[in-house]
Structures are given as C-alpha cells and as structure tokens.
Image (cartoon, helix red, strand yellow):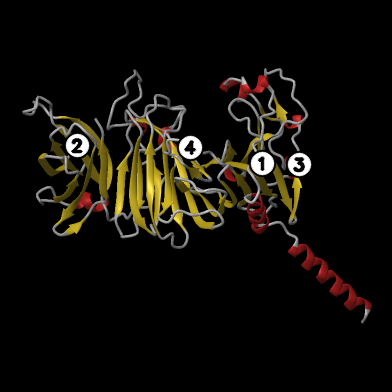
C-alpha cells in the first residue's frame, strides 16, 4: 500500500471515528434511559440564604457582563446566562457542543455584573438557566430556559408571554403537581452561517426522566421543532405532553374584583383545538372563582394552542406590558398522536405575575414504567391564527345578566358571542343564519338569536338561559343553510 493511500485511509478512519463519537440526541436519550433505572436523587439547595431572600428587583439587577458568551468570535447568534437567586435556585449544568464534542461551561462570577447588589458568591454556584439571542436585523432575545422545565420564545416584534414546559405531571391530582426539571443542557455553538439554534436537554423528576431536542428557527414567527422521549420510573395519575402555561387575569367576559385602569389583562384569551375530525373548537379563558378543568377528546389532532387573538392596544391600555404583542403558541403534532384529549386547567388568580392556565395533551392509553413515550411536534410562537380563514372566528365572549328576574327570583344569564372573518362578514344582514346549540341537561334555554352587527360587520349570537345554579357547559356554532361557517364555541359557566 502506498504512503498516500495509507494517509487517505487513515484520514477517513479518523473522520468516521469522530462522526461516530459526535454528540447528538441519542447520547441524551441513553442518559435518560440509564437515569430512570436509578432511584431519584433529591438535589439539596446549596444556594446561600442571601440569594434565596433576594427580591424580584434585586435579582434582575444581575446582568451578563459580556453581550454574549460567543461575543469574541463575532457570531450572529448569542448565549447568555441566568444566575441563581430569587425563586430560581435550582442549578443546571450547561455544556457547549463544538465540532461534535461536548464541553462543560463552568460557572464564573466574571460572567456577571451585580449592579448595586453586594453578595459573597460561593465558588460552587451554578447557572439557573440561559437565554439565546439573534443579532440579525436587530432581533434580540429569542428564547429563555429558566426554572423547572419551563421555556419561552418569541418571534420578531413580539413580547414574552405564554410559556411552554417539558412535561406536566399530576397537574390536577389532589396529592399536588410534580414539576420535572431540566437538569442539564447541551447547546450547539453556531458558526457565522447558522440560522437556527440546537439545544438538547435532560429531564429528571421522581416519576420520570426524558431526553429533548430543540431546533429553534428565529423569525417573524419563531418555530421550535421538538423531539421528546420520556421514561417513567413509576405510574402517574396525569401525564401531560407538550404543555403550555399562561396567564389570564380578566378580559371582556368579566371584570376584576379590584380596581385597575386596564380593560383587559392576559397573555392568552382562549384555547384553540383542531380535534382530528375537521372541527375547530374555541374555548374562551375566564377568571373563575375555583379550579376548573376541561377535557376535549381528539383523535390525532392537527394542533392545539393558547391563543392571544385580541391585538388591539385600546383593549389593554398598557404601554409597558404590551399584551397586544404577546404571541399565541400553537402546538403542531408531527406524525399521528392517536386517541387522547387536550386538557385545560384554569386556576383562580389575583396577580398578573402568576401563570394560572395550563393546556396539554393526554394520551388515551396511560404510559407505564419501562415504556418509552416518543413524541415529535412543532411550537409556533406567532401572531397568526392557524384556523381556516373560511371559518368565522370567535372575536369576543361577553357574559351578563338579563333584565328582570325569573320565577325563582334570580335573573337569567346572557351569553353574547361575536364571530368575525372575511367570509362570514360577507354574508348580508338580510340572510338568516341558524345556530347549532348544545348544552348540559341542567340548562333551560329561554331565548337564542343570531343577527348581524352592521356597525362592525360581525355576526352576533345571543343566548339567554335560566340560571342553573351550578356549573354547566354550552357549545354552539353558526350555520348557513346546512353548512357550518364558524368554529365551535364552547364555554363552561360556574356560579
């Protein structure tokens, strides 16, 4: 064999060997599968008390000293870190992937500026999380991973709002919810031609472990393609996949019990679902007085999401929070998810700084320990509405009392639902639309009416029912002849 051929073969073997050893999703999956066979290790909090007692304002005075971790290389994408402290006391291990090799990113106090804070920082501190930035066209921050398995993203000219999570366990169980944690992350170092981020994450909790891959493409809409494998240590009562979490304080369907100059305060105003049967469902969010849970059956749905439909600043009047710029988050399954349901959980709240809405997918067949649950989906952080333009969309839901009182001395309930959209708005007012209305057995319908609001060109459905005195469900859509021309409006009323 000639020396030249020998060198070529040697080079090919080296290249092949480095390809085989390149870090990828299979490495994270192997670690999650090995971890689930071990007892869950409770990680004690080593963060000094001076950090755990920090106020919100003190914590956010801690900033990154450099523009980003890759600043010296002049890359178009950036990485910054979150410090432990305040409520973010669980440490995470960060690694960089460069050339297929994983390298730990050790905590360094020199990464941070502490503002007016004066703390003694111990040498064994860890990061609490990280954020990703895109410097092209003045985009700025794209994503942040901070706290348990929470993460959130935005498209260009959006403001942070609804978040996502890795996994939701026992959300409504009386024993209390379990919050799995992303213990480790691996972040691929971009090059000057990179246009997407690649992040791997290892999840752990008393009941489950998991491996995650996030391919994040920043843009007008930021899209994250997510690959997930979950392993269970023990059975769980409620297994929620692709969970979203958001805040709804009040909207046009109710007024706050406290004084606030703003007409509406929310990150999202409704849950949208395509249930796999071609039906689109809209369930408005509401600030209730008690925990409420709704389950919407589906068969391989094309998607679900917590949507922020209202984009009118005049409806919020908050030039700081910018609720009208907060994204809708749409979960688009990749492949068939089979039978299951989308579950919506809403909690009472009196604070806009607390998420009180959760939506997630629950498979019909509960997974068992030893079984790998594999899932692929996209997360769209968007201002667009994925439902068909040919269907009328619910623009607003308003609830009130009818004038006068019933024979029982209680005034009737009135629900007013407005539908908008190019097609339905083109239907002339002289044409009569009908309503398909279904409801709980306890409901007595006093009156229902459908008419065009010629002031804003929408169509209005007004339903009056006798006060049932207990929780009831309503479901309705409009028809033109025999054809449904709106999505299905659903609502749960509680006294």
Q: Could you tell which of marks 4 and 1 lies nearer the N-terminus?
A: 1
- Badge 1 element: strand
Circle 4 crowding by C-alpha within 10 Å: few under 14, some 14–19, many from 20: few
**Residue 177's disc number:** 4
Q: Position of residue 491 (x, y in %)?
A: 26, 41
Q: Could you tell which of marks 2 and 4 lies nearer the N-terminus?
A: 4
Question: What residue is pinned by disc 1?
Answer: 79
**Residue 415's disc number:** 2
In the picture as drawn, the residue positioned furthest to the left comes out as: 407
Residue drawn at x 42%, y 33% is 356
- Badge 3 element: helix
Q: Could you tell which of marks 3 and 1 lies nearer the N-terminus?
A: 3
- Badge 2 element: strand
Q: Is residue 140 visible?
A: no
Q: Could you tell which of marks 3 and 2 lies nearer the N-terminus?
A: 3
Q: Could you tell which of marks 3 and 4 lies nearer the N-terminus?
A: 3
Circle 3 crowding by C-alpha within 10 Å: few under 14, some 14–19, many from 20: few
Give the side of residue 386 with respect to residue 80, left or right: left
- How much space separates mark 3 and mark 1, taking CA atoms? 12 Å
**Residues marked 3 and 4 touching at CB (< 8 Å):** no
**Residues marked 3 and 2 touching at CB (< 8 Å):** no
**Residue 72's disc number:** 3
Residue drawn at x 44%, y 37% is 246
Relative to 110, residue 440 above or below = below
**Residues marked 2 and 1 touching at CB (< 8 Å):** no
Q: Quadrant of residue 291?
A: top left
Q: Position of residue 9 (x, y in %)?
A: 85, 74
- How much space separates mark 2 and mark 4, taking CA atoms? 33 Å
Q: Quadrant of residue 293?
A: top left
């Amino acid at each position: 064999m000639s020396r030249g051929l020998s060198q070529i073969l040697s080079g090919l073997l080296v290249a092949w060997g480095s390809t085989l050893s390149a870090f990828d999703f299979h490495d994270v999956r192997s670690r999650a599968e090995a971890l689930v066979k071990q007892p869950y290790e409770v990680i004690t909090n080593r963060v000094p008390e001076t950090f755990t007692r920090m106020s919100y304002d003190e914590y956010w005075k801690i900033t990154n000293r450099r523009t980003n971790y890759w600043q010296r290389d002049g890359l178009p994408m950036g990485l910054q870190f979150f410090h432990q402290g305040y409520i973010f006391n669980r440490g995470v291990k960060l690694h960089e992937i460069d050339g297929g090799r994983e390298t730990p990113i050790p905590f360094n106090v020199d990464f941070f500026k502490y503002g007016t804070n004066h703390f003694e920082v111990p040498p064994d501190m860890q990061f609490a999380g990280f954020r990703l930035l895109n410097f092209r066209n003045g985009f700025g921050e794209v994503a942040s991973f901070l706290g348990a398995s929470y993460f959130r993203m935005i498209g260009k000219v959006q403001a942070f709002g609804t978040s996502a999570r890795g996994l939701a366990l026992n959300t409504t169980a009386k024993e209390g919810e379990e919050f799995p944690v992303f213990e480790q992350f691996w972040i691929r170092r971009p090059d000057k031609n990179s246009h997407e981020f690649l992040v791997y994450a290892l999840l752990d909790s008393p009941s489950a472990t998991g491996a995650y891959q996030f391919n994040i493409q920043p843009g007008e809409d930021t899209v994250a393609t997510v690959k997930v494998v979950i392993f269970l240590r023990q059975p769980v009562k409620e297994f929620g996949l692709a969970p979203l979490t958001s805040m709804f304080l009040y909207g046009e369907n109710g007024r706050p019990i406290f004084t606030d100059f703003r007409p509406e305060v929310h990150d999202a105003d409704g849950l949208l679902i395509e249930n796999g049967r071609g039906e689109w469902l809209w369930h408005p969010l509401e600030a209730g007085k008690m925990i409420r849970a709704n389950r919407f059956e589906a068969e391989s749905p094309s998607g679900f999401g917590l949507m922020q439909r209202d984009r009118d600043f005049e409806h919020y009047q908050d030039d700081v929070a910018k609720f009208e710029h907060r994204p809708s988050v749409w979960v688009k399954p990749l492949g068939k998810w089979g039978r299951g349901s989308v579950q919506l959980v809403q909690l009472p709240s009196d604070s806009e700084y607390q998420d009180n809405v959760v939506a997630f997918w629950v498979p019909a067949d509960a997974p068992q320990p030893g079984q790998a649950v594999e899932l692929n989906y996209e997360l769209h952080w968007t201002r667009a509405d994925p439902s068909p333009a040919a269907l009328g969309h619910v623009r607003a839901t308003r609830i009130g009392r009818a004038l006068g009182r019933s024979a029982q001395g209680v005034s009737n309930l009135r629900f007013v639902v407005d539908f908008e959209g190019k097609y339905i708005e083109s239907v002339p007012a002289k044409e009569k639309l009908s309503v398909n209305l279904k409801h709980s057995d306890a409901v007595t319908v006093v009156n229902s009416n459908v008419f065009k609001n010629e002031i804003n060109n929408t169509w209005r459905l007004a339903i009056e029912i006798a006060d049932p005195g207990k929780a009831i469900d309503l479901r309705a859509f409009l028809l033109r002849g025999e054809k449904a021309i709106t999505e299905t409006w659903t609502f749960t009323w509680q006294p």
